[in-house]
Amino acid sequence: MKRTWWKEGIVYQIYPRSFMDSNGDGIGDLRGIETKADYIASLGVDIVWLNPVYSSPNRDNGYDISDYEAIMEEFGTMADLESLIEVLHRRGIRVVMDLVVNHTSDLHPWFRESRSSKDSPKRDWYIWKPAKAGGPPNNWKSCFTGSAWERDSRTGDYYLHLFDPGQPDLNWENPELRRAVYAMMRRWFARGIDGFRMDVVTLFSKDPSYRDLMPGEGMFSGTAPYVYGPRLHEFIREMRREALSGFDVMTVGEAPGSTVENALELVGEDRGELDMLFQFELMGIDHVDGDKWRQRPIDLVEMKRIIERWQLGLAGRAWNSNYLMNHDQPRSVSRFGDDGCFRTESAKALLLLNLSLGGTPYIYQGEELGMANAAFDSISDYRDVDTLNYYKEARAAGVAEDEVMRSISYMSRDNARRPMQWSAGRNAGFGSGLPWIGVNPDYMTVNAEAEEADPSSVLNFVRSMTRFRKEHKVLVYGSFELLAHDDPKLFAFLREGEGERLFVEVNMSGDVAKAAMPSSGMTPLISNLGSSANTAADRLEPWEARISALHRVSSPV
Ligand code: NOJ
């Protein structure tokens, strides 16, 4: 497979609203990010992905864009963004922006024009349908609860919004709209950005039948008539030709509904479509019947199977992107680790795991500190539209308050969106003004300043681990072989290639675990328990994670 910077790079994801507030208005901003450029560089990451920074009325925190080429006022100006890009570039860090073109804001001039009349020249840029039997055109559901159709009083027709009513879906069937999107993308590349993370890319093409969803179908099932629709590949190839060719940029598609099979058609290296995608199989691991608000415990054996399927399934044909959390998911240490007794150990173990897999690793802000989930007592403290809608719907359906709040405390997207914890000072050092969303009270102990000073912190471990990955290209390009498939505690695998053979072992439990191989014939290289750890032993301490070099072929014990 071809070698490139985005395969060898490590991505750091920044949610600007919650990263650093430079002007005291309680909202993170671009200048705030710039003041942390040295910190970002110190993590050993190569690429920064910025969540949307464009003009937006913020129904969905910037995923409802009203101008693709203007910056959200609270975040700063285009000059601030250009300065940030320059400052990061100077440190050798590339910048990837979010591309949200499945939908716009309802305040985008395109939609204002489109909704003005049935004869509007932009009418066809969005998806309008007449009522059916006095109601919506079909039974599609919005990802944020309720019907995916909104009746517009101006004409009586309905428009499609797979997310909030303030996020009308664009009609990708319209060639003029597509041309406008490609031209906008090219202008962004001309401003010097290095790629796009493409929001819900697998939803661009809708099945023209607009048939009803069948029981069990939804955004993440892949068979829904708006997921991997009939013209998706045609659109993406056209986008590559018209917008991407000639630029050395990376593309990663957010890809609900992906399986290894359909993913290969979107990111296969021979396909000429996208470079990478975010699959959701792992993120669905604790959902009951695909419903994220109904949760079950994580089964490690299943987690290993999912990761193995993607590691092997794309090997030699496409490139994985590995993440354990992002701005839409619970904090990784609270979900896959143990944010109680073993917060530090398990946060490091998860970082070691994610940074040892084949593919491009993504680290989400605060993950490098082991920041954890934090529930609010009252629904009025939550900010996320998805969470608030679910609360209303579930309560109206009679689900008990404590049950709803329990589910929200674990799964709400606000867990990942609480302010970055910079210090034990006021507002966790996020800024002088009252933050737009409350800080996690644990900031007194969990914060960057404290971790900076502590050699055994999660922060200092992640730095060692990013360095380690750079020094061992086998972790980037080597083969993957899972061991001990059925072991309920141990996540162990081999990476081989580039003249090296590495053995990765992670004890994903709070108990002692038995090693998967005898320790003879291997040299311990890195461990999350540091040099004090008994890394040569045939057992692993709770949440111990380590990588060793194998000198000879040992057989599993
Ligand atoms: C996926 C984004 O990651 C999420 O935050 C957003 O709400 C939806 N797409 C809609 O744009």
Image (tube, rainbow, N blue to C red):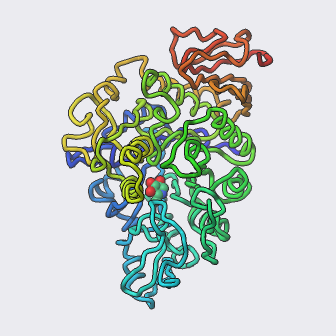
Q: Nearer the viewer, residue 248 or 228?
A: 228
Instruction: Examine the rendered structure and indicate whether residue 181 appears above or below residue 218.
Output: below
Q: Position of residue 471 (x, y in %)?
A: 60, 26
> Residue 140: percent from the left, percent from the top?
54, 69
- The mark total stands at 0
**Residue at image location 42% in from the left, 21% down from the top:** 457
Residue projecting furthest to the bottom: 119
Is residue 113 visible in the rendered image? The answer is yes
Q: Residue at x 50, y 72 (%)?
A: 170
Residue at 80 percent across and 18 percent down: it is: 555
Q: On the rendered structure, is 199 left or right of 220?
A: left
Q: Is 446 on the left or on the right of 237, as rendered?
A: left
Residue 77 vs 441, above or below: the answer is below
Residue 350 at x, y = what percent? 53, 30
- Nearest to the observer: residue 249 or residue 160: 160
| Rendered-image quadrant of the N terminus | top right
Residue 62 appears in the figure: no
The C terminus appears in which quarter of the rendering? top right
Q: Quadrant of residue 113?
A: bottom left
* Image spot of residue 93 (x, y percent): 47, 41
